Amino acid sequence: MKLNQTLVVVAGLAAALQIATAGNVTGKITLKGTPPPEAPIPQAKENADCGKLLTAVPTTQHWVVSSKAELANVVVVIKGVAGAKSTGDAAAPALMDQVGCIYTPTILAVQTGQKITVKNSDPVMHNVHTRPNVAGNDEMNKAQFAKGPDLTFAFSKPEDFLKFQCDVHSWMFSWVTVVDHPYFAVTDKDGNFTIKDVPPGKYKIVATHRKAAPKGMESDIEVKADGGKADFTLEVPAK
Amino acid sequence: MNQSPHNSWLHRFAVLTALATLTLLGIGGLVTSHGAGMAVPDWPTSYGYNMFALPFHFWKGGVFYEHSHRLVASGVGMLTMILAVWLWFSETRRWMRWLGVIALVAVVLQGVLGGLRVVWFKDQIGIIHATLAQLFFALVCAIALFTSRWWVERRPPARLNGGLEQAGSETGAPLRWLFLSTTILIFLQLIIAATMRHEHAGLAISDFPLAHGKLWPDMSDAAVERYNQQRMEVVSLKPITTFQIGLQMAHRIVAVMILIGVAACAWRGAKTQLRRLTFTWLGLILVQIALGVWTIWSNKAADVATAHVLVGAFSLVTGVLGCIICNARLAGNKTPHVVGDSQCSTIRTVSV
């Protein structure tokens, strides 16, 4: 019993020490090439309910690129961190909302076991239908009434770009990447990302965008006590 | 011959059931074309309500298509039940009574499959559901044919009075086999189509007459990844796979084979009493091919894709009814200038 307590204390101290010496990994993703124009979604504006919530015909959001070619919605994951485990059970829930019959955000990343809270800010009924491809992640389909109570989802297996969709409004879909550790981030509208509290060491870092090439661009990174930096340039795929 | 006297009301009811089934097929096609199959997450209830009591304010977007499909399906189920009971108690042809029972079992099975597709999340069930729908439509149309005055009051089949041997296979057999083999091809095509639609991946090949810019598309992993990266999904679609590209190529090849088969039927049937049927069939297939091309060029517009499903169903039914008529080798040949007992036999003008 005493030995167990000692082990727990030692492990706790080691974890605290690791966090104390861990640094943030930052970087920027830029895009080379001109992406195709986004497609309009006329059916969203034509829909009797959703049309009232939209001021203009929305477009797809496959390529969110700034004027400086900075690419948003890239999932960046560090691989090879020794002993890295999901802290999803204790992590704050990730939030996904439905606003104007559009999912916000369109790309989300969570840990295995981490709760995903899906809100419905619309005065419109939706259904939230998950379409996993990895065994162990459950397909679910739940109704969510207009401004109804939040729904909660969680997935136990890592999976890239697990789809959430609304079958009432076929243009509504988003993706959630599920990672089995906490060392990941999604780039913001300026293409920036920050992965917090990465323990020092040499790792692989992988940047994945749904449409850009190459799929899962990999690079080496050395993280020191003061963190690390990794920039990527992804490309519009050649025809 | 144990033939029931013609019951015109029974026949009309069978036609009504066939028309209702056609409507159901159309709505079912719209459900899949709009990606609305899961818009009502529960079954047999609808959003927790008794299916028949779902308030109208729910009937929007994908729910409209899916819920309408459920209600019309219930109506077709009721019609089929009445038809089966009516056949059972009024038909003297034993096989017709059992045909009604088979139709009833099929419609119940079809309803259960539709429900299980929703609650079990299985695309494969959707494929079976779509295929059985086509078979059920063909079955109900066959029942409508068998209850028609034309069928009931036709002369006894040649097979029963020894005429089959007299007619010989030299004339009727080729057309009969052409009908059968082409109808089987159409059924195979409908299974391919159901698989394509119920994989929910949209157009695996988005161009025509080429396929991803080539006569035969590059189906390597790298190419498939590139196709997925390049397409701009407006509605929720699964990623394209090599299998789906292969399936769409098979769909195109089988379409050409069907066209050849039906054209051969029209050619061989041009001088028989089946002339009108075979040329109607050919017309349907040409319309169907045009709709298939339009489906691709319209990026799978829901109404066009659904029309493609319906004309496919008509094509199968025409083939099935043609096979039945051909195979029955009707003796009711009313044209004095025709020699032979079969409508499938080639006409031979007699000098008088």
Image (cartoon, coloured by chain):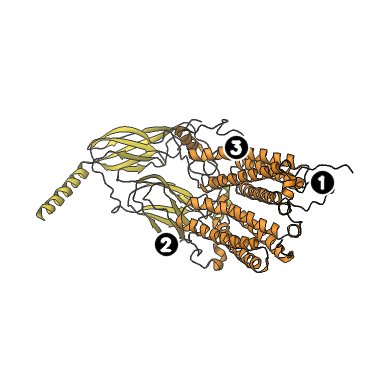
In front of the other: B276 or A111: B276
What's the colour of chain A in the image?
Answer: yellow
**Residue B13 visible within the image:** yes
Q: What element does badge 3 sit on?
A: helix
Q: Nearer the viewer, residue B252 or B121?
A: B252
- The residue under label 2 is which amino acid type? Pro
B329 is higher (above) or lower (below) than B245: below
Residue bearing mark 2 = A149
- For the residues beneath circles 3 and 1, the answer to whether they share a chain is yes
Q: Nearer the viewer, mark 3 or mark 1?
A: 1
Mark sitting earlier along the chain (3/1): 3
Please name the residue that numbered disc 3 is placed on.
B253
Quadrant showing the N terminus of chain B: bottom right
Disc 1 residue crowd, few under 14, some 14–19, many 20+, Cα 10 Å: some
Q: How far is mark 1 from mark 2, CA to CA? A: 76 Å
Residue A214 horizontal side relative to residue B105, left or right: left
- Mark 2 Cα-neighbour bin, 10 Å: few <14, some 14–19, many ≥20: few
Residue to which mark 1 is pinned: B338
Question: Which chain is indicated by disc 3?
Answer: B
Q: Disc 1 residue type?
A: Val
Q: Residue furthest left?
A: A2
Chain for colour orange = B
Q: Secondary structure at mark 2?
A: loop
Q: Is residue A120 visible?
A: no
Q: Give the CA distance from mark 3 to mark 1.
A: 37 Å
State which quadrant residue B278 falls in: top right
Number of the front mark, 3 or 2: 3
Horizontal and vertical percent position of residue A133: 41, 47
Q: Which dot, 1 or 2, sits closer to the camera? A: 1
Residue positioned most to the right: B352
- Chain under disc 2: A
User: Quick one: B287 or B190, which is closer to the camera?
Assistant: B190
